[in-house]
Amino acid sequence: MVVIEKCPVCENTETELFVATQDFFLTGESFNIVKCKVCSFVFTNPIPEKNHLTAYYESPDYISHTLKKWDVKSYIYQKIRKINIKNKFKIVSKYQNNGHILDVGCGTGELLKYFKDKNWETTGIEPAEQARNFAIENYQLDIFPENKLQQFGDSKFDVITMWHVLEHVVDLNDRLALLRELLKPGAKMIIAVPNIESYDAAFYGKFWAAFDVPRHLYHFSKQSLTMLIEKHGLQLEAIYPMKFDAYYVSLLSEKYRKSGIAAYPKAIINGYSSNRQASRSGNYSSMIFVVKRK
């Protein structure tokens, strides 16, 4: 295990325990999530060594990197993903009608295929070999492993997207600094992350599925992500909700609470409650941040 000595946002060394939880998804191991005493950024600490983290993704149930459709949860996931792809395209199109998009953590490539079909130039980064090969073979996309990021050259892309990816990145500040340089001046980066200040996060506590330790290393709020992007010379332009996430995260959280057959009705009720609360507070279960390179 590796202890993070400094807050990744403000570099303060003092933290306090935020919640003790466990890897409900795969290993059952216990992990602590801490909160910076200065800027209130929340992050998993300590974390597994970088070369050991891949083992925590090695499960056929990690459906963000698969296309299985033989159970109810996966079926729902796939249907919602199709809707989300259209919504993501609409958001990007508000800021850029066409150009070259880089999707970091593109999974099996469905989003990039949608953009490609709309005559965008598309490039993807995906560390999981199986997902990467699926995207290449089935959609004829240009998808590369992570080390390709260092080889693109500066000011190349009109849009860079990371949909539920930034919370997984070990070298958080190095990655943001690199991605900023890959953007053309004035170009947009779109970052989607779970929101630690959402109703469902508070309701489920240590069982909140979006903690997803140790795969999720960082647990963002609107304030902490804004501080982080400004640190890297990026400017926040807009925030959009991901309303479906409240239901999906609630469903997984109910599973971790061992709710049995009651999981689905409870997830619907709590997902609805989360979105209703967020309509007033602005703190949806997951948020999309549109930022610009200054």
Image (cartoon, rainbow, N blue to C red):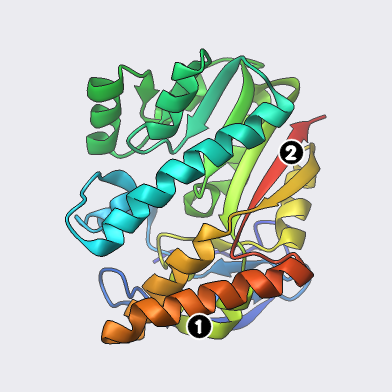
Alpha carbons under labels 1 and 2: distance apart: 30 Å
Residue at figure coordinates x 37%, y 34% from the top left? 126
The quarter of the displayed image where residue 134 is located: top left
**In front of the other: 264 or 232:** 264
Do the numbered discs 1 and 2 sit on residues whose CB atoms are within 8 Å?
A: no
Tag 1 residue: 204
Quadrant including the N terminus:
bottom left
Residue at figure coordinates x 22%, y 37% from the top left? 130
**In front of the other: 20 or 75:** 75
Residue at figure coordinates x 48%, y 38% from the top left? 85
Circle 1 SS class:
helix
Amino acid at pointer 2: Val
Amino acid at pointer 1: Tyr
Above or below, 190 relative to 218: above
Q: Position of residue 82 (x, y in %)?
A: 42, 42
Residue 183 in the figure: left or right of residue 141: right
Tag 2 residue: 291
